[in-house]
Image (cartoon, grey):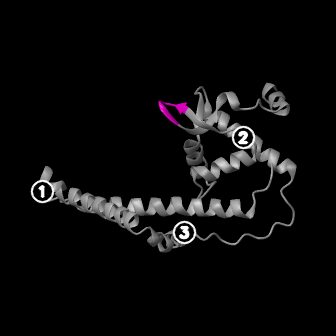
Amino acid sequence: MTEPTAMQRSARTLTHGQRLLLRRIATRAAAWVRAGRRDDLTGLAAILGCILRAVLLAAGAYGAWWAIRRWPAVLWLLVPLWCWAAIRSIPKAAPEAPAEDPPAVEETAAQREQLLDLIRTLVGDRPGVHLSTLLDHLQKHGQAEGWEVGDLKDRLTALQVPVRKSVKVARRVAYGVHRDDLPQSSPTEATQDAA
């Protein structure tokens, strides 16, 4: 597997930052709209504030779209600002100590087998497991802190664990690992299980 180029790493960083920024904007907008609800009223009167705030957001979005259509040169200012905000939205991680040696092949193989065992356990008798479910399980057990589904997908790809774009589990379709794509357990594990 080839190492990603500097441009690919930069694009991934920017994409990750944009996802975080969009999520933050959507969360704040939803909280602002919800704050318009009045608890002292009932029925439609209680949510009129929410409706008004949602209309204001829609009008603001339409106004921005109209301004960009009318004066497209404003994008020369907006795009760099957006990229800057996206990169700033990425949380700063503690600096990692420089690795003296790349991880050993045996260590990577052990990580892969451990992850495959976990996936087999989570799949059980279902057709597969969604990456979001796998990520939730890992985070509940103190692993993959701060990761998103895209980070887990990249890690699985690096460990050569096949990921499908659409795995159907419990009437929901999402990125996941399908049971048919899982390799058979290693011969040493099979003998240990038989013993």
The residue where tag 1 is placed is: 41
The residue where tag 3 is placed is: 83
x and y percentages locating residue 46 in the rendered image: 16, 55
Q: CA distance from mark 2 to mark 3?
A: 32 Å
SS type, badge 1: loop
Is residue 169 shown in magenta?
Answer: yes
SS type, badge 2: loop
Residue extent of the magenta highlight: 168-173
The residue where tag 2 is placed is: 161
Determine the residue positioned at 54% across, 69% down: 83
Amino acid carrying label 1: it is Leu
Which is nearer the N-term, disc 2 or disc 1? 1
Determine the residue positioned at 67% across, 33% down: 120
Q: Nearer the viewer, residue 84 or 111?
A: 84
Amino acid carrying label 3: it is Cys
Amino acid carrying label 2: it is Val
| Residue 65 relative to residue 158: left or right | left
Q: CA distance from mark 2 to mark 1?
A: 54 Å
Q: Nearer the viewer, residue 194 or 62?
A: 62
Residue depth check, mark 2 versus mark 3: number of the one nearer the observer: 3
x and y percentages locating residue 88 in the rendered image: 55, 72
Is residue 136 shown in magenta?
Answer: no
